Amino acid sequence: MAFKFENLRVWEQGIELSAEVSKLVKTFPTEERFVLSAQMQRAADSVALNIAEGSTGQSDAEFKKFLGYANRSAIEVVNCLHLGRKRHIITEDDFSRMYTAYEGMIIKIQALKNSF
């Protein structure tokens, strides 16, 4: 692996969760394609993107700042899960599974951030 972020388990989990979000939003109704599904996918992608961007050639303080951005994006995904559940386009099972996964992701990002 050539880049620092490629060795980070939290980045790898971000990639995996983004793929899960991609599968989930493909089940949304057409009218949500450019609304909730697009927003949710961008937020999910942003988690791993911010981890990668912050880790590459930045100071520890700069990396911490990008980890904060990644955490905010993960929180945005959680909020999208709530919106989807409220709109009856995300099942309780999918909500619970994804909520738990993002809860764990947020904890891991915060732990990495606190390690500096």
Image: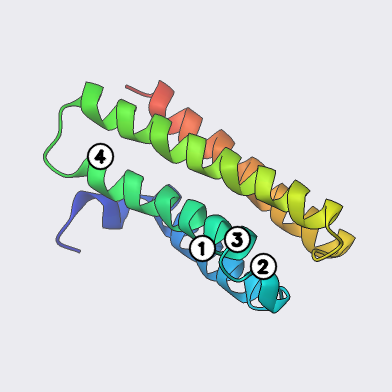
Q: Quadrant of residue 92?
A: bottom right
Sooner in the amino-acid sequence: mark 1 or mark 3 = 1
Spatial CA span between label 4 and label 3: 28 Å
Q: Residue 23: give x, y in percent of width and height.
A: 62, 75
Please name the amino acid that badge 4 sits on: Gly
Q: Quadrant of residue 78?
A: top right
Q: Are marks 3 and 2 in contact (CB under 8 Å)?
A: yes
Camera-side residue of 43 and 9: 43
Q: Residue 87: give x, y in percent of width and height.
A: 83, 57
Provide the residue designation for mark 1.
Answer: 18
Other residues around mark 2 within 10 Å, as few (<14) / some (14–19) / many (≥20): some
Provide the residue designation for mark 3.
Answer: 35
Sooner in the amino-acid sequence: mark 4 or mark 3 = 3
Please name the amino acid that badge 2 sits on: Glu
Sooner in the amino-acid sequence: mark 1 or mark 4 = 1
Provide the residue designation for mark 2.
Answer: 32
Task: Give the residue displayed 85% in from the left and 51% down from the top.
Answer: 86
Considering every residue shown, the one lying at the far front of the view is 31
Other residues around mark 1 within 10 Å, as few (<14) / some (14–19) / many (≥20): many
Q: Residue 99: give x, y in percent of width and height.
A: 72, 49
Provide the residue designation for mark 4.
Answer: 54
Sooner in the amino-acid sequence: mark 1 or mark 2 = 1
State the quadrant of the C terminus. top left
Considering every residue shown, the one lying at the far left of the view is 57
Q: Is residue 50 above or below residue 98?
A: above
Please name the amino acid that badge 1 sits on: Ser
Spatial CA span between label 1 and label 4: 18 Å
